[in-house]
Amino acid sequence: MDIFEAIILGIIQGLTEFLPVSSSGHLELAKAILGDNSVPEESLTFTVVLHFATALSTLVIFRKEVTEIFKGLFQFKWNEETQFSLKIILSMIPAVIIGLLFEEQLESFFGGKILFVGAMLLVTALLLLLADRAKNTDKSVSFSSALIVGISQAIAMLPGISRSGATISTSVLLGIDRTKAARFSFLMVVPLIFGKIAKDLLSGDLNFHSSEIVPISAGFIAAFVSGLLACTWMIALVKKSKLSYFSIYCAVVGIIAIAFSLIN
């Protein structure tokens, strides 16, 4: 992988991690288009690095909320900060269970399965369309809704189903305020990303040669910067009920991906 491809993939990851169009699905499509021939270990390393970059951009945008979460965990008081922290933890449980028990099965959906990615993008398009038509409310995230949104996040581990799209759409359909839904969606994934990185580091699955440092670094910077922009933009778009535009986009890309897969 050269620097140009790394930067392109980094920008795609940074934008699509926050925009409801499936970062994993777009990375799979981009690798297919760019002819990425990386061996699985190298591809996994690069993907993890890009996710780490977008996780850091989330921490920068939501540094105040992240500080409140940590305060809530160590205050040992039943206040708003503590409850929000526990809701974040509760939302992580479904993805952790699925990730640990069905890791090999999940990985089998990656690796150039463009037809599957296209079909899942159509599912994402439908979710976004339904959410865009939901009524605006000022309801906060409850413990029960946190668990339901967590289940959506677990399902969104499949390539083509947007994690932010699935979690924000589920939250909005549950009647949660759009801005609060976006904030919760972006914060709930951060611990999972860092947990996955720690697991891969400890297992020794991440391997790269010295010649890959430059392109990996370029991809990291591209993902971090584009992630900062996309995260800020997405919060504004959700608040203004602009999800239908992304629904159309996902539908178009999904149809193109399906057609590309069938032709080839």
Image: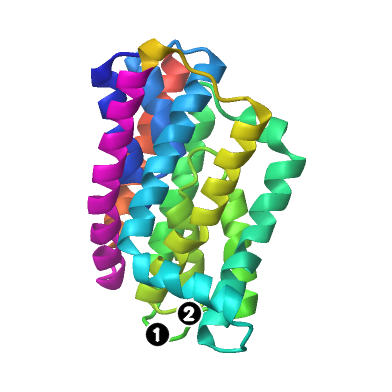
Question: Residues at badges 1 and 2 in contact (C-beta under 8 Å)?
Answer: yes
Where 97 falls versus 36 (above or below)?
below
Which residue range is magenta in the image? Answer: 213-241
- Magenta region, main secondary structure: helix
Q: Is residue 20 visible?
A: no
Left or right placement of residue 17 versus residue 144 in this view:
left
Amino acid type, callout 2:
Gly
CA distance separating discs 1 and 2: 6 Å
| The stretch drawn in magenta includes residue 201 | no
Where 93 falls versus 116 (above or below)?
below
Q: Could you tell me residue 181's position as x and y percent?
A: 43, 71
**For the C terminus, which image quadrant?**
top left
Q: Earlier in the sequence, mark 1 or mark 2?
A: 1
Residue hosting label 1: 137
* Crowd tier of the residue under label 1, counting other residues whose Cα lies within 10 Å: few below 14, some 14–19, many 20 or above: few
Residue hosting label 2: 175
At x 24%, y 71%, the residue is 240
**For the N terminus, which image quadrant?**
top left
